[in-house]
Amino acid sequence: MVTKSSKKINLVLASPRGFCAGVDRAITIVEKALEMYGSPIYVQHEIVHNKHVVKRLQNNGVIFVENVDQIPKGSNVIYSAHGVSPEVRKKSKKLNLKVLDATCPLVTKVHGEAKRYSKIGDVIILIGHRNHVEVQGTVGEAPDRIIVVGSVEEVGDLQVPDDSKVAYITQTTLSLDDTAEIIKALKKKYPKIKGPPKADICYATQNRQNAVKALSKIVELVLVVGAQNSSNSLRLLEVAKATGVNARRIESATELNVEWLEGIENIGITAGASAPENIIQGIVQGINRLTPIKRISTLEIVKEDVTFALPSVLRNS
């Protein structure tokens, strides 16, 4: 049996944290579709990378699939926030599926860049993680023209037919610092390389990474709330660790360990863009069960007021 520590600690909550506008929109699309059409509603891939959200929606009649071929003809399907390839859209049309698109508009922007660069004959360097579903969807826009790179070392191995016909785009949930290094290496290797007029890494990813950097300066332990398959949560963990602070990723209060709190006076909490606030608050309560909390404060670096419109068919439902 673990005994509760008597030492009081301070909790500092990063702001912004948790749900971003794209995730909030995606979940709302699923919930409104359930209200409008009833169950089952099929979703291509997890709507967001969070098992708590996925489980709740499953309990309400949502069926998650990895391939639209698994969906009965004529059914309602929603594309996840991560986006899908044109091939998936073609399959959906062939199956006469009724589609609602929950792709984050910032991911859609990257797809548009891929199509634009492909149309003018550029080789496209996609900075990202090959196995991530967002990257797979983007690659599908121009599979014969896109090369995925995930590190500065991989840039050194690149070979393209024409150094003057190269462009780069990025996955939206990457580490700002790592991506900047890769872009720097690309520009050195290909001085004429084109890039998006505005950074592809999404505002929420940028804000959460900046917040965790600030948080890491004033605490001894940072807890990052997020799933193992959540790219932006893993990047938050990397960013925190890079500052030298002790940092751990957890998905719920059940993973808390009283030993983590030994010798700690200040704990910081942040969360990936797909982590719901009730899970974060559950972790706060879990910490209080392990050791008394002296004070809870918020470190706000910027106020987010971004919203994305729902598909027109759902706006008045």
Image: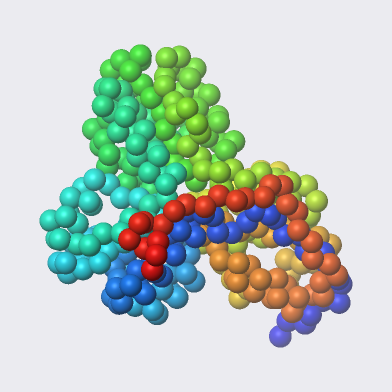
Residue at 45% in and 75% down:
56
Depth order, front residue of 270/99: 99
The answer to whether residue 147 is visible is no
Q: Quadrant of residue 285?
A: bottom right
Q: Quadrant of the C terminus?
A: bottom left
- Image spot of residue 274 (x, y percent): 51, 60
Query: Residue 238 at x, y = what percent?
Result: 60, 47
Q: Going by the image, does 306 lie left or right of 244? A: left
Residue 3 pos. (x, y %): 77, 82
Image coordinates for residue 222, horizontal then vertical, percent: 70, 57
Judged from this view, the residue extending furthest toward the bottom is: 1
Q: Is residue 140 left or right of residue 60?
A: left
Looking at the image, residue 21 lies above or below residue 262: above
Asked if residue 255 lies left or right of residue 261, the reply is left
Residue at left 21%, top 68%? 75
User: Which residue is nearer to you in this view: 76 or 226?
Assistant: 76
Q: Is residue 307 visible?
A: yes
Q: Nearer the viewer, residue 149 or 40?
A: 40
- The answer to whether 315 is drawn above or below residue 150 in the figure is below
- If the image is split into quadrants, where does the N terminus sit? bottom right
